Image: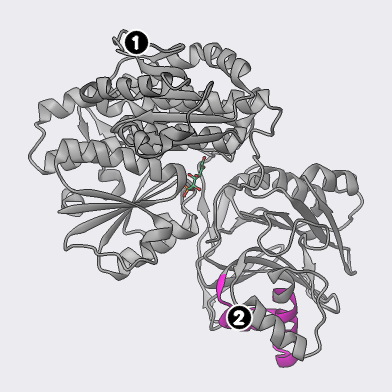
Amino acid sequence: MCGIVGYIGKRQAAPILLEGLKKLEYRGYDSAGLAVRAEGGGVSVVKTKGRLSRLCEETADGARLAGTCGIGHTRWATHGEPSEENAHPHKCMDGSVTVVHNGILENYRELREKLTRKGYVFYSQTDTEVIADLIDYYFKKYRSGPVDAIARFMSRARGSYALAVLFSGYEDIYVARKDSPMIIGAGRGEHFIASDVPAILKYTKRVFYIDNGELARVGREDVAFFNIDREPVEKQSVKVTLDENAAEKGGYEHFMIKEIHEQPSTVELTLNAYLSGGAVDFSECNVDDGFLRADAIVVVACGSAYHAGMTLQYVAERLARIPVRVELASEFRYRDPILAKNTLVVAISQSGETADTLAAVREAKARGARTLAVVNVRGSSIAREADRTLYTFAGPEIAVATTKAYSAQLVAGYLLSLEWGRLAGRLTAAQIAEYVAELRTLPQKIKDILEHKEDIQKFAAEHATASDVFMIGRGVDYTVCLEGALKLKEVSYIHTEAYAAGELKHGTISLIEEGTVVFGVMTQGGVLEKTASNLEETRSRGAYTVTLSFAGEKIAADAEVALTVPRTDELFAASLAVIPLQLLGYYMSLQRGLDVDKPRNLAKSVTVE
Ligand code: F6R
């Protein structure tokens, strides 16, 4: 949600900033801007509304902004409509402080009023302009330098922020962070600032993680860190292992289809990381039996990660007979949740930065629960704040709609379920080895599905004008419907509803009319016939029905189209059944001429509430 970059060194800053923003555009794409300090001179700002390509045009790919120090921003609007005026960077009233910001300043109205009383006049509707002016106010009032002015701002600010700030008369870039991600990359005689590692991988793999509530002065040769009391903080850089090419399209037309195709390897890598022979082994993450053994599990997550949590619930309860509750992190954090003694709270998040999930982890910890994060991005806030972290191995996920990270989350859920089953004395080593052997077949089976993707492409071409789609299923199939429906909605903008098949006739069936497309996901043996009947009920009311089942399964329902995936253990069916639905979202979006990697109104990594 909003991307920040910064550069200070010997090279021209603007092209490097634009390069970095391209890598971060998935975080927001309604406007963008750069601020570059001319050698020994003032700070020039260029901002454009719309996609980053407009800023590249406006600055001739950065050539029009000379200088070796600068900051940049790609925006996902929170306060104020997308416009050139509201785009970042923002300057304070007399232009001496320039700021880019990711996050939300919650008390910005109150601070804006205070500043208005002090004579400040505002040109935008943003909270960020208030930040620039407040820092300027403290800077001029106390005259004790940039670090002090920013620290005073931090003491007054409520909400979340990652800030990069330029001050007139000071060479360096100043940064601060609270609940919004930011890293600093270290090169030779140069430093980089970014919301996310892929933005700087081309230049360096050495990064400093700046912690919550800390600030830093970033110079050409050195970086100095401070806590909010302005005391120096010692920090070592760490080497990141990400491959630069992992964040490129690699010959695919879009990131989403590239990432869909990466799923066999994502699943395999995540399995390899935590399997040793026929058993699960989490020792690398320091997750031992004592930590995992729990009387109850509560999963907190948002969006697709929540859907992965729903699947985990069905699988874990079946294998371990431990009660599992899955909660939307945004609800959990404010509803005064009851956590029984010896509850393990599992937070699932691709980015590790989702504000609600992070807050849910904090809430769980405050209530004395143990917290385990299932996270994809190394060193992210949730990974650092949870007691233990199981990393998934999806690599950088750039498309806004998640695919491969969700698949990796499913795998983490299966492995955890097997461990809980073992700890509960419900699974023998031999049974676990059998499940593990089946899990190891998933990558090849996903490849097999992808080899037949043209079937889905053809279906999408025929149904791209559909205005309503329903997806129904029971048990694990219902969780697949939730994820499939989200994919279709977010990238193709087709109204899609996922329904537990048995629930349809308690109201929603009144929406079924002639030609409404209804998918019946049917992989769960015990409830196959039930879902088949529910699908029939829609067909007899005019629906155009599609079944999605294991190859070779006899389905007791007539349908216009029958899609299949290779057979696997029912518990792991989500990993296969979701693939055709991801492809459906992708191809429907293409058919409708939409920007599949950057759907309207969305942003990856939701760091605001
Ligand atoms: C949907 C999607 C979102 C995320 C959700 C949580 O395709 O990507 O629903 O799953 O915003 O994000 P993370 O996993 O980063 O916490």
Which of the pair 480/163 is nearer the observer?
A: 480
Q: Residue at x 56, y 12 (%)?
A: 454
Q: Position of residue 485 (x, y in %)?
A: 48, 34
Distance CA(mark 2)–CA(mark 1) = 62 Å
Q: Height in image: 275 above or below 125?
A: above
Q: Which mark is residue 551?
A: 1
Q: Residue at x 32, y 68 (%)?
A: 336
Which of the pair 55/51 is nearer the observer?
A: 51
Is residue 607 visible in the rendered image? The answer is yes
- Position of 291 with respect to 351 (left or right) is left
- In the image, residue 132 lies in the stretch drawn in magenta: yes
Is residue 287 visible in the rendered image? The answer is no
Q: Where the N terminus falls, by quadrant? A: bottom right
Q: Residue at x 58, y 13 (%)?
A: 458
Q: Amino acid at mark 2?
A: Ala
> Where does the magenta region start and end?
131-159
Q: Residues within 10 Å of mark 1 (few under 14, many from 20)?
A: some
Query: Which of the 4 image quarters holds residue 552?
Result: top left
Q: Which mark is residue 151?
A: 2
Q: Height in image: 299 above or below 398?
A: below
